[in-house]
């Protein structure tokens, strides 16, 4: 395992003296850069944590050390998960720890006894694995595998009867679900009246106030401040750590998506740079449906909801 190197001149020297190819040198430099990015100090002492929390909504809540190198803030009011997370997120430059809301039940955690021994090299390796992963393989299969003749254009998904008649006139029938959904989305998003009629169904994605609330909430401060690293600690049902981490990585880099809470079969996020109307919102809707197979809203309606919204919600149950 290559440890952190503080001086890139060592790489240049190695290339000259050992005749290493510059392809290898570039790979080494990239690896070492990643290691440095993960080689950060995290706050460990509980008294220091209590001091940092003073003046926030978290200051009177109990704190303890968790089993996997994490620090745990318990007693978070379920209706204040987003506020509590935001307070801990704002303190991350001091704590060096990414906060995640969990339900407190043991099975929500991915049991990895060695997570408290995670080294910068191991965290960097997880990032590399997430970057190589292809989380969207088979993204549209669930929509295109249905025989076209079984797709009813007079489906209840249509916002109004007039749109049904437009579809019958304009689409080459029979049509697959993916094509039909995209057609509905483009028609509704470009029609102000139809668009306005759909706004009330978007509340789940608007501000996080309509999120699921468990009976018990703990805020866990993980031993990393990297946005996709929670996938190493927190279990999201039906998705392996690297796959979940790859989705978090891509979403974070593209739209500034950050995991707020994970309840095992549900996950909640804030979005710093929401997708714009059109192709971006459509791709986000497809990807959310892929990671949240239990979401009930149609593709087109979810795409409308995601345009410019600051919170996301996933659901994947057995």
Image: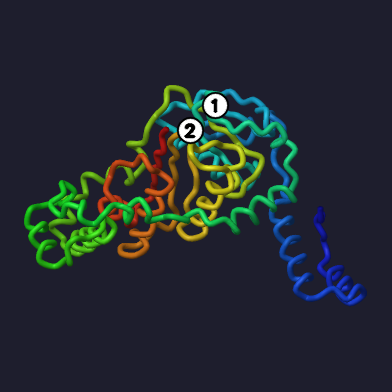
> Which structural element holds mark 2?
loop
Residue depicted at 23% across the width and 63% down the height: 186
Mark 2 vs 1: CB contact within 8 A: yes
Which residue is labeled 2 in the image? 264
- How many residues crowd mark 1 within 10 Å: few (<14), some (14–19), many (20+)? few
Q: Nearer the viewer, residue 53 or 169?
A: 169
Q: Residue at x 19, y 62 (%)?
A: 187
Q: Quadrant of residue 19 in the image?
A: bottom right
Q: Point out the tag, 2 or 1, that comes first from the N-terminus.
A: 1
Q: Which mark is residue 107?
A: 1
Specify whether residue 60 is in view: no
Residue 292 point in image, percent of width and height? 40, 43
In the picture, residue 275 is in which quadrant?
A: bottom left
Across and down, in percent, residue 288 comes to 39, 49
Q: Residue at x 11, y 62 (%)?
A: 168
Q: 260 or 163, which lies in front?
A: 163
Q: For mark 1, give the secondary structure.
A: helix
Residue 1 shows in this picture: yes
């Amino acid at each position: 395992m290559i440890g952190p190197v503080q001086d890139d001149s060592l790489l240049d020297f190695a290339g000259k003296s050992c005749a290493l190819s510059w392809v290898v040198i570039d790979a080494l430099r990239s690896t070492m850069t990643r290691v440095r990015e993960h080689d950060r100090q995290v706050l460990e002492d509980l008294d220091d944590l209590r001091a940092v929390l003073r003046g926030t909504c978290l200051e009177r809540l109990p704190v303890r050390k968790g089993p996997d190198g994490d620090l745990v803030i318990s007693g978070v009011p379920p209706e204040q998960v987003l506020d509590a997370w935001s307070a801990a997120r704002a303190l991350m430059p001091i704590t060096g720890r990414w906060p995640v809301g969990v339900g407190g039940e043991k099975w929500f955690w991915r049991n990895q006894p060695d997570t408290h021994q995670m080294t910068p090299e191991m965290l960097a390796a997880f990032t590399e694995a997430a970057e190589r992963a292809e989380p969207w393989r088979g993204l549209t299969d669930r929509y295109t595998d249905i025989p076209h003749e079984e797709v009813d254009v007079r489906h209840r998904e249509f916002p109004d009867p007039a749109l049904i008649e437009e579809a019958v006139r304009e689409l080459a029938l029979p049509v697959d679900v993916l094509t039909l959904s995209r057609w509905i989305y483009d028609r509704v998003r470009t029609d102000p009246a139809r668009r306005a009629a759909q706004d009330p169904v978007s509340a789940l994605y608007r501000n996080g106030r309509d999120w699921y609330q468990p009976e018990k909430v703990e805020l866990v401060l993980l031993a990393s401040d990297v946005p996709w690293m929670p996938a190493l600690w927190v279990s999201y049902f039906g998705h392996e750590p690297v796959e979940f981490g790859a989705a978090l990585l891509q979403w974070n880099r593209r739209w500034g998506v950050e995991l707020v809470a994970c309840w095992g079969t549900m996950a909640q996020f804030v979005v710093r740079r929401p997708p714009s109307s059109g192709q971006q919102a459509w791709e986000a809707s497809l990807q959310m449906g892929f990671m949240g197979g239990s979401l009930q809203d149609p593709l087109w309606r979810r795409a409308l909801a995601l345009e410019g919204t600051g919170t996301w919600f996933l659901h994947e149950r057995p």
